[in-house]
Image (cartoon, rainbow, N blue to C red):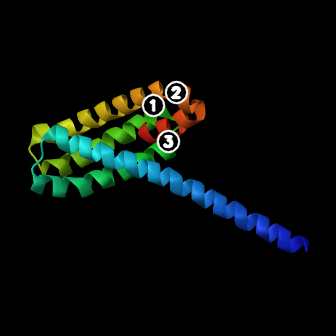
Amino acid sequence: MKKYVIILILFFTGIAAYAQDEGSDDKAGKIRDRMSEYIRDRLGLSRNEAEKFTPVFLKYFQEFRQIHRENRTDVLVFKQKIIDLRIRYRNEFRQIMDEPRANKVFVYEDEFRRKAIQILETRKDRLGEKGIQRNRSLLQ
């Protein structure tokens, strides 16, 4: 009987953990999509450029998140890896658009993050500190 109880507890714990991961990815997906749309609008991309830009930007965003997860504790290493990532992706963005707009991708990305954090800060009273921290980690 104890075996069955332990198996059920492990099963439900696994489902709960999976559901939390899904929610986190869903929030990251919404933020990623809104950021991509914001940057496309700010750059004034043509339809053809936007179709080429979006998949490249999504890869960049995923790599950015991975670097953030792996280097949260070491700020200098994090910054260095982000600089290397941006240099690599700037070259990919140059293949899609002209150089000045390729450089502005990162300016608009930072601008979006600042605005999103400001919005989250204004909701701080309503959501409480936990909600703010969870969403903020997706933006930093």
- Front residue (pair 8, 59): 8
Label 3 to label 2: alpha-carbon separation: 26 Å
Three-letter residue code for mark 3:
Asn
Query: Crowding near pointer 3: few (<14 within 10 Å), some, many (20+)?
Result: some
Q: Quadrant of residue 111?
A: top left
Q: Position of residue 123 (x, y in %)?
A: 48, 28
Q: Is residue 66 visible?
A: no
- Taking 52 as reference, is 78 above or below it? above
Q: Residue at x 49, y 39 (%)?
A: 135
Dots 3 and 2: beta carbons under 8 Å?
no
Badge 1 element: helix
For the view shown, which residue lies furthest in the front direction? 126
Q: Position of residue 45 (x, y in %)?
A: 12, 46
Query: Crowding near pointer 1: few (<14 within 10 Å), some, many (20+)?
Result: some
Three-letter residue code for mark 2:
Lys
Badge 3 element: loop
As drawn, the label of residue 124 is: 2
Dots 1 and 2: beta carbons under 8 Å?
yes
Label 3 to label 1: alpha-carbon separation: 23 Å
Q: Earlier in the sequence, mark 3 or mark 1?
A: 3
Residue under label 3: 71
Label 1 to label 2: alpha-carbon separation: 6 Å
Q: Residue at x 59, y 60 (%)?
A: 18
- Taking 3 as reference, is 52 above or below it? above
Residue under label 1: 120
Q: Quadrant of residue 59?
A: bottom left
- Front residue (pair 99, 42): 42
The quarter of the picture where the N terminus appears is bottom right
